Image: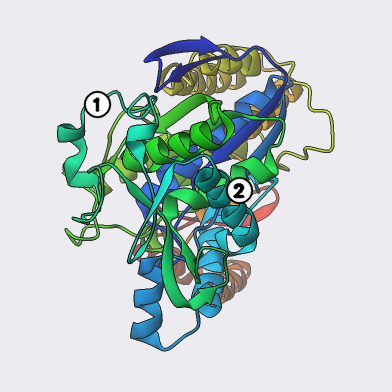
Amino acid sequence: MNLFDSVLKEKVKLDKKNVNIYLCGPTVYDDAHLGHARSSICFDLLRRTLLALGFEVKFARNYTDIDDKLLKKMSQTGQSLEQIAEFYIDSYEADMRALNVLEPNFKPRATHFIKEMIELILELEKGGFTYVLKDGIYLDTSKDEGYFSLSKRSLGENLSRLEFNEGRKNESDFVLWKFDENFYEAPFGKGRPGWHTECVAMIETLFKDGLDIHCGGIDLLFPHHENEASQHRCACDKNLASIWLHNGFVRIEGEKMSKSLNNSFFVKDALRDFCGEALRFYLLNSHYRAHFNFSLQDLKAASKRLDKLYRLKKRLNLQSFKDFDEGLQNEFKTKLAQSLLEALSDDLNISVALSLVDEFVAHANLALDENKAQIKELEESLKELALILGFGFLDPHEYFNFGIDEAFKKEIEEQIKLRDEAKKAKNYALADEIRANLAKKNIILMDTAEGVLWEKNNE
């Protein structure tokens, strides 16, 4: 497996079989947006690929559940920190399940690691890397010779991303602990942790044998990841992670996604109109390091592309598939799976992988047309495809009828029953009228040997 390291700016080989991965997760003060979805899906693809290749993977995705943004939400809503965090963690996890993102092995919350953060700050203090201002404890980055080794940029290039505090010794210095009488007791004063300190303490606690891959959005490279790496280097005299991976920005209709621009498209909004697999498929369409330009038109086009896979699954009369069970040994034997894994082993080359899917669907349909298809082999190929790429699990009927509520389903079944009765009474005009009325509502009826089936018309 070869991956592009953001620090070295080149592909490196992952040559160990037990892999520890940490993904910077959301700050839980609002619903998940497309940037969260893109990052989670990209690195879920990494995890699935590694599992399919036989790696032993331990995957952590954190929650920042104490932060200035949460405190602001508290003042706006009157809710407690815990209530806000719990609500948005539940919302985020529901979105991730809809997108077929595998459950992490670890889901650390910042508030559960306060003791470890205090210990980290004491270690930095002991080494002479800190100083105190009236609002908190700061790291003196001038004492870290490796500072900027991650982002490879000068201070001037990065000033816009730094919090301003004129009392700091250096522009790049950052807060480790914010004094605040409303929060946690510590030897150096009551307060709460700085954002950059949280991840370091969680990583050091969860992965005592070292972190192999650190993931996150490219917007986190500086200052967040730079400051994480600096603290660990100063406290432990070694690198925080062996490989750093970053996914590109999400842009909305060509503009960088941002809450300040009011174009931060929430996942739950997209899931009202598109099934989770269609959104996942679309967000996977570009390489993880590329910036992603989101548009509804492109999402609709991607959904049509995924329809072809499900039409094949429907043609084979296949139902839902099960997702990964990490407790079981999964062997990937089909030619399609081997080709997909070869492509994805090259820094998750999704363009080649998805072209292989298109070719497979086309060839499978041709083989079925000519009665030359090996049905069992096609089924196994589709199952392995789903496990690797994270889409294709659904029952085709469920997939094609996404968005139809229970009341409308009941109405459709009642109309089908009335149509059957009309046909038995040889009232074909009424039967045709019922079919036509349902067609106006985008419901297509299909008379088959197994009875009448219906499907939502997605054209």
User: Neighbour class for label 1 at 10 Å: few (<14), some, many (≥20)?
Assistant: few
Q: Is residue 134 left or right of residue 365?
A: left
> Residue 202 — which label?
2
Q: Amino acid at mark 2?
A: Met
In percent of the image, x 70 and y 31: which residue is there? 57
Residue nearest the observer in this picture, 359 or 48: 48
Asked if the residue at tag 2 contacts the one at tag 1, i.e. Cβ–Cβ closer than 8 Å, the answer is no
- The quadrant holding residue 292 is top left
Seen from this angle, which residue lies furthest right? Answer: 328
Locate residue 145: give its quadrant: top left
Q: Quadrant of the N terminus?
A: top right
Q: Position of residue 50 (x, y in %)?
A: 64, 24
Amino acid at dot 1: Arg
**277 to the left or right of 179:** right
Asked whether residue 387 is in view, the answer is: yes
For numbered disc 1, what is the local secondary structure? Answer: loop
Please say if 359 is above or below 90. Answer: above
> Residue 270's image quarter?
bottom left
First in sequence, mark 1 or 2: give its number.
1
Provide residue 37's location: percent of width, then percent of height: 43, 48
Mark 1 lies on residue: 153
Please count the marks in the image.
Answer: 2
- Vertical comparison of 452 with 311: above or below: below
Q: Residue 223 at x, y = what percent?
A: 33, 41
Q: Residue at x 32, y 66 (%)?
A: 134
Q: CA distance from mark 1 to mark 2?
A: 27 Å
